[in-house]
Amino acid sequence: MIAIFFDGIVQGLQLSLLAVGITLIYGLGGVLNLSHGQFAVVGGVAAALLLEAGLNPFVAALGGIAGAGILGIIVDRTLLLPAYRYRGEERLLLGLILTLGLSFLIDGYLNYKFPEFSLTFQLPVPMVEIGGIAMRTASLAASLIAIVIFAGLFAFLRLTLLGKTIRSIIENEVGAELCGIDPSRTRTVIVCLATMMAGVAGVTQGLFSSLGTEMGPEFTILGLLVAVVGGVRSINGTLAAGILLGVVNAFASRYVGAYVAYIILLSVAMATILVRPAGLLARFT
């Protein structure tokens, strides 16, 4: 029981890593990125290619994460520019169409180019015992990485000047512009940061499971689910929703199977949204 609960927390932290990028991009840019899961896969594929080139696994993982961030910058400065010319619903709808098309493009290319791809990292010590419970070191490593990233993100947003600038744009983009803040440059930084976190989620997926090129749409759907349940403008809510849904999914998968687990997951998400339509924590925090 405890082992299943821990696996659920690990899954939840990975879901939160995916979803927080969606939250940041939507909160700052007003664009709901439907290709976010594909950035996670790109990060994993880039890491695998660097591994095949003979690089150290740690360096390869960093390279894959950086690759996802670079792709995010390119997309932000090219594909999303037409959407940024609008505000409100027009920006949201155009962003949905553009990122949906991008997701099809990335999926098609990766599945064609790397049909047999699978990323798996092997740690030297596979299992450790904590309090009499055997735990996978890969799960512990993935959890620690996610916790460190979230702690760094909270510190960045609350303690740095750039973080406070980001918060001001999310609260009032027009007001921030009147104060001399350039939302365009700040958006690019956030898109890069968000896609790098997606890359981290893709790479760490290879730690405790395996990553395939076909997993992009699944990542996007799960990320959107967590973001909506937590509140699409709330980082705290995203973290809480990810852990909640991860634990629910772990127990459901163990006792009723993966297919029914997805139905239960969606049911819990729907029930949460009915009770809290704006999400668990609607405010940007």
Image: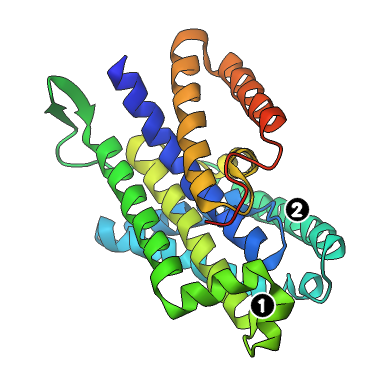
Depicted 45 relative to depicted 68: above or below: above
> In screen coordinates, is 123 left or right of 259?
left
Per the rendering, the mark at residue 130 is: none
Q: What residue would you read off at disc 1? A: 77
Tell me where residue 87 sits by quadrant.
Answer: bottom right
Depicted 33 relative to depicted 224: above or below: below
Judged from this view, the residue extending furthest toward the right is 90
Instruction: Judge the density around disc 2: few (<14), some (14-19), many (≥20) Cα neighbours within 10 Å.
Output: some
Tell me where residue 222 sits by quadrant.
Answer: top right
* Residue 91 x/y as whole percent: 81, 65
Mark closer to the chain start, 2 or 1? 1
* Residue 31 x/y as whole percent: 72, 61
* Secondary structure type for disc 2: helix
> In screen coordinates, is 131 left or right of 84?
left
Q: Nearer the viewer, residue 124 or 98?
A: 98
Which residue sits at x=46%, y=48%?
202
* Residue 285 x/y as whole percent: 52, 56
Q: What residue would you read off at disc 2? A: 100
Amino acid type at mark 1: Arg
Tell me where residue 14 sits by quadrant.
Answer: top left
Instruction: Judge the density around disc 1: few (<14), some (14-19), many (≥20) Cα neighbours within 10 Å.
Output: some
In space, the residues marked 2 and 1 are separated at their CA atoms by: 17 Å
* Residue 284 x/y as whole percent: 58, 57
Amino acid type at mark 2: Leu
Colour scheme: rainbow
Which residue sits at x=81%, y=56%?
97
Kindly indicate whether the residue at mark 1 contacts the one at mark 2 (C-beta within 8 angstroms). no
* Secondary structure type for disc 1: helix
Q: Which quadrant is the N terminus positioned in? A: top left
Which residue sits at x=85%, y=60%?
89
Let me know if residue 205 appears in the view. Answer: yes
Let me know if residue 75 appears in the view. Answer: no
